[in-house]
Image: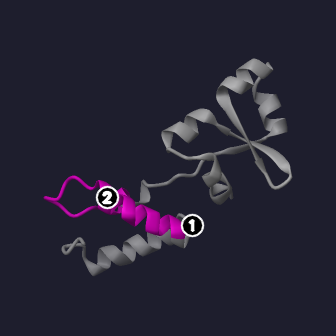
Amino acid sequence: MFPKFSKSALLVLQDRFADNKFTDQRMMDSVNHVIDSYTSWAREPNIGDFISFDRKIRIWNYKEVLEKYESPESMKRAFTEHIFIEENRYALSEDLIKFNIKASQLKLLTV
């Protein structure tokens, strides 16, 4: 897809994926994202174009939410509740919007 992307750059990219703990799926999503959204065809993409595709978000437990927010109203404005396995977990609504993440995808993203 990117004919001028050198073998040495590919090796560095592989190392960066490994160092940043990209799973195979995250790596493929990153590569596909660069292919789908790349607009500067006058130059080859750089390592940062691939690594910057990172969709990690913080998942909060109920105790952490209570410690951060004083009232249930402010908590509800900031957080969207999702249930994982047998516990309530929370993700910031702004993170879900920012990364265009659906609730069904959250289980895949938790670490």
Q: Residue at x 45, y 63 (%)?
A: 29
Q: Is residue 63 left or right of residue 110?
A: right
**Residue drawn at (52%, 37%) of the image:** 97
User: Could you classify mark 2 by the number of other residues whose Cα lies within 10 Å: few (under 14), some (14-19), or many (20 or more)?
Assistant: few
Q: Does the magenta stretch include residue 94?
A: no
Give the secondary structure at mark 2. helix
What amino acid does circle 1 point to? Answer: Lys
Residue 58 horizontal side relative to residue 37, left or right:
right
- Magenta stretch: dominant SS? helix
The residue lying toward the viewer, choosing from 16 and 84, is 84
From what the image shows, is residue 77 above or below residue 16?
A: above
Residue 3, given in percent of the width and then of the height, sits at 19, 75
Q: Quadrant of residue 95?
A: top right
Q: In front of the other: label 1 or label 2?
A: 2
Which type of secondary structure does the marked residue at label 1 adopt? Answer: loop
Quadrant where the image shows the C terminus = bottom right
**Where residue 105 sits in the image (x, y, percent)?**
61, 54
Please state the horizontal and vertical placement of residue 59, each as a whole percent of the image. Answer: 70, 46
Quadrant including the N terminus:
bottom left
> Quick check: 86 above or below 24?
above
The residue carrying mark 1 is: 21
Could you tell which of marks 1 and 2 lies nearer the N-terminus? 1
For residue 81, which numbered disc appears in the image?
none
Q: Which amino acid, mark 2?
A: Asp
Range of residues picked out in magenta: 25-49
User: Does 32 lie within the magenta span?
Assistant: yes
- The CA span between labels 1 and 2 is 23 Å
* Image location of residue 107, percent across then percent down: 68, 56
Front one among 12 and 111: 111
Q: Which residue bears the numbered disc 2?
A: 36
